[in-house]
Image (tube, grey):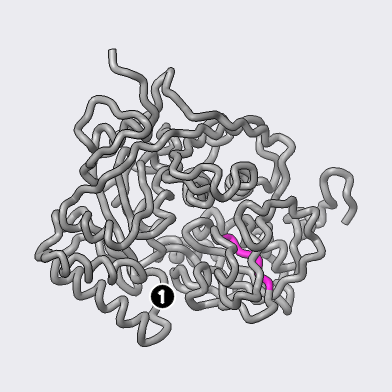
Amino acid sequence: MSKPMTISEKILARAAGKAFVQPGDLIMAKLDLCLGNDITAPLAIQAFYAAGGKTVFDRKRVALIPDHFTPNKDIQSAEQAKILREFAREQKLVYYWDQGECGVEHALLPEQGVVVPGDLVIGADSHTCTYGALGAFATGVGSTDLAAAMLTGQAWFKVPASIKLEFNGKLPKDVTAKDLILLAIGRLGVDGANYRALEFAGPVISALSMEGRLTMSNMAIEAGAKAGLIAPDAITKKYAEGRAQRKPRYYVSDPGAVYERTEVFDVSRAEPVVAKPHLPSNVAPVSKCRDIVLDQAVIGSCTNGRIEDLREAAKLLKGKRVSPRVRTIIIPATPAIWRQAMKEGLFEIFTAGGCIVSPPTCGPCLGGHMGILAKGERAVATTNRNFVGRMGSTESEVYLASPGVAMASAIKGRLALPEEVRGEGWRRGVKK
């Protein structure tokens, strides 16, 4: 009888050609996909050539996505994108997108079926862990690691221990996947899961849409995790059907699999939260932060730029306008999401309500463009990081929140709960 393993261990064992692996093992594993963007891939391409590289190991297993500074904001970003474009053409890469076809990488690759359940993926971007929502082991690496992967199709790993995060109860109204992952990071801390694989489980996770699951896995890195996985189920299989570019492999943890520990969350009494500056772990209820006046709101990114997120924001805004003091920027994460939002009339709601609608881009999430903060300014954003200077000036502030909280706050001009905008009064006996 084989020894029990977690999802992460099963994927790594398969990729390493082993029957069994355990935490601490050093392995060399074959990769299903490696990827880079317009910030990280140019360095990888330079290292690829410096190492004597002529052709990538498999032109169907390397993906390049120029999403951080596109449309190019200046000459330097144009040069970065040009490096990707020329390398993709030279190598005849199957998975390269540009301009009108390009979207935020961690939304685009699952949507296009380029990452599939059971994959082992590395990417020269820390939020590569997003793909764990599909039941893949995906993790961020440096540019030189990407160069080696493009050459060899392999990478070495130390098998991580797994921590199970079990979410029980029933989600209250307006509490979303973004709130769940912020609550988890608030408990674990930004280094509480260093080099661990987080496994999100429990009935609350099972009930989440794929969009919600992608949000959860996206921010695993903010607790220091190597990866953040969700066991594939009927929702995963429905998402992969007709989309997956390769045959999925569906792994679940064995009964008796060993976890370093299990953290249990009862969310029945949870409420919407924000992560206050300057760490994703600095979590507080929105109801305790109502005095925070805002200058900007950003709804988008690889964390919350999907159609479900835009619908949530538009539903709150319909028939209203954002505060004249809050620049409100809506960024659909991919062209397909952009088109769907337009088809559903969401853009009409956003623009009539005083918002700016952007083409797909990472943009302000990393302080790139399309919404940079000046000294002393404060933003609420559905992005994943709020470090010092993350969205612009080192003397600005970013509050992380769900799309509903971000839009409610944009309307009110300060941090606010969705129920305030709906005029419902507040839960927990607090008056408007």
How far across and how far down the image is residue 173, in percent? 70, 44
Residue 35: image quadrant is bottom left
- Residue 355 rendering spot, x and y as whole percentages: 62, 74
Q: Nearer the viewer, residue 10 or 25?
A: 25
Q: Residue at x 44, y 43 (%)?
A: 195
Residue 147 screen position, x and y as percent = 23, 61
Residue under label 1, please give it.
Answer: 69
Q: Is residue 380 magenta?
A: yes
In the displayed structure, does residue 61 sit left or right of residue 98? left
Image point 30% across, 82% down: which residue?
Answer: 79
Residue at the image point whose x is 45% and y is 65% from the top? 338
- In the rendered image, the residue lying farthest to the top is 1
Q: Is residue 362 above or below residue 224?
A: below
Q: Is residue 74 visible?
A: yes
Q: Residue at x 21, y 53 (%)?
A: 61
Give whichever of 184, 72 is nearer the camera: 184
Main SS, magenta region, reads: strand
Taking 148 as reference, is 280 left or right? right
Magenta-tinted stretch: 378-382
Quadrant including the C terminus: bottom right
